[in-house]
Amino acid sequence: MAEILFHGAAEEVTGSMHLIQVDGRWVALDCGLFQGRRAESEEKNRQWPVPPGQIAAVVLSHAHIDHSGRLPRLVKDGFDGPVYATPATRDLCAIMLPDSAHVQEEDVYYVSKRRKKRGLPPIEALYDYDDALAAVRLIHSVPQQRWFQVVPGLLACFSEVGHMLGAAGVRLELAKRNGDTPSIFYTGDLGRFDQPILRDPSPLPEDETILCESTYGARINEQVDDAREVLREVVSRTIRRGGKVIIPAFAVGRTQTIVYYLHEQMLAGHLPRIPVYVDSPLAVNATEVFKLHPECYDAEARAFHQVTGDILGSGCCTYIRNVEESKALHGRSEPCVIISASGMCEAGRIRHHLKNNIENPRNTILIVGYQAQNTLGRRIADGARQITLFHEEYQVNAEVVQIHGFSGHADQTELLQMLAPRAEDATRLVLVHGEPDQAQVLAQKARGLGFREVVIGRRGDHLEL
Ligand SMILES: [Zn+2]
């Protein structure tokens, strides 16, 4: 008997985790952190669909925290099996999971302080630094295009999805049963074509069941090349008026994309050579991991690597880890680009850069990533004229520009383009990792393409294979 059990990222986009049961053994596909409203995600992050001690192995599609961030808790709650991931995913997890532990501990510290004032007992962090390291130690790395045994009766193979460094889709093949060998392809997060640095997604394989993400099932985003051009224009005009470009960006992925583009345009003479600063310790570490894995680059990035020896800005970009150097940036007056985290301006050094620069009309605040509701980044992107930082009010006099085209997720057009060749041969298409409105639109479009059976995975649902 074999089945899939949906747990996380079912009709939502965080907490990715689907379980496959093969002859009584459970295997988890991803083990992501639920994010969003605090009370709700707190509770979800502490619940498991089956006892962690009964999970035999985890197969990890990529390092984003909404796909990997609950591994330390799984280990803390009794899991001690292997975690399979690509080499770049393992190296990214080695920096991202300890960083996530730090965020959890910091968060709990503030929550417990508030609870104390109300006479309530402190709460315990989801996991700590040691749990994160214990999880990293369980990761076995397997390169793409190599079959490996996950548990007896289940083989797996990673393939390119072009979403982030190391990200992979997973082909799963079950041992023969009733004369059949059921197979599944789990997309993890599907990326886009023509993204910088990364290879394009491979065609979806001919598997019976496709477990596909649907984040932008109903949305069409800007083309990557258009986004690159807007970036160049924004930086050019800010330089012309003698200002600074402040870019809040996620430390892993988005930061490297922006640095790559700026470096490329400066070398080609399309942008004047001005200083670019990456001010985030996690981004600096992530950049080191990018440099360790040229096997993940596309042909263009490899060629660029051969010419420059470093695709991520040596010569034009300064990477900042320590606080003193970060503070020293506030005193600089010449045009420059400052890329800093967090990506939604909710924490981190970016808040200091905003405080120092947002009131100057010569400067630009450039938003390059998704901004969730109720975040400072969203308020700025939505055109707030005044913001509060460190309990003080600041006027938004700087130019504010938002670029959507750097998204790492396939949009509706790209999803349909990838799915179309499988419409005739796939037995069924299961949509996960999408809000209901996005998944439903994609389901309808997929039926239109000719998929026989299209289902939306719901939390707690079982699907027999
Ligand atoms: Zn992702």
Image (cartoon, grey):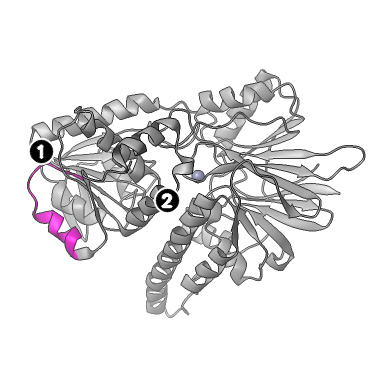
* Separation (CA) of disc 2 from disc 1: 38 Å
Badge 2: few (under 14), some or many (20 or more) residues near its Cα, within 10 Å?
few
Looking at the picture, which amino acid does disc 2 mark? Leu
Identify the mark at residue 362; answer none if there is no mark. 1
Position of 53 relative to 86 (above/below): below
Q: Quadrant of residue 209?
A: top right
Q: Is residue 255 visible?
A: yes
Q: Disc 2, ligand 1: is the CB inside 8 Å?
A: no
User: Where does the image place residue 410, in percent across and percent down from the top left?
Assistant: 50, 32
Please provide percent x and percent y for residue 31: 59, 55
Circle 1 packing at 10 Å, graded few (<14), some (14-19), many (20+), is many
Residue 333 on the magenta span: yes
Question: What mark, if any, has residue 292 been given in the picture?
Answer: 2
At 56% from the left and 44% from the top, the residue drawn is 12
Percent from the top left, x then y, of residue 317? 23, 46
Residues in magenta, as a range = 324-337
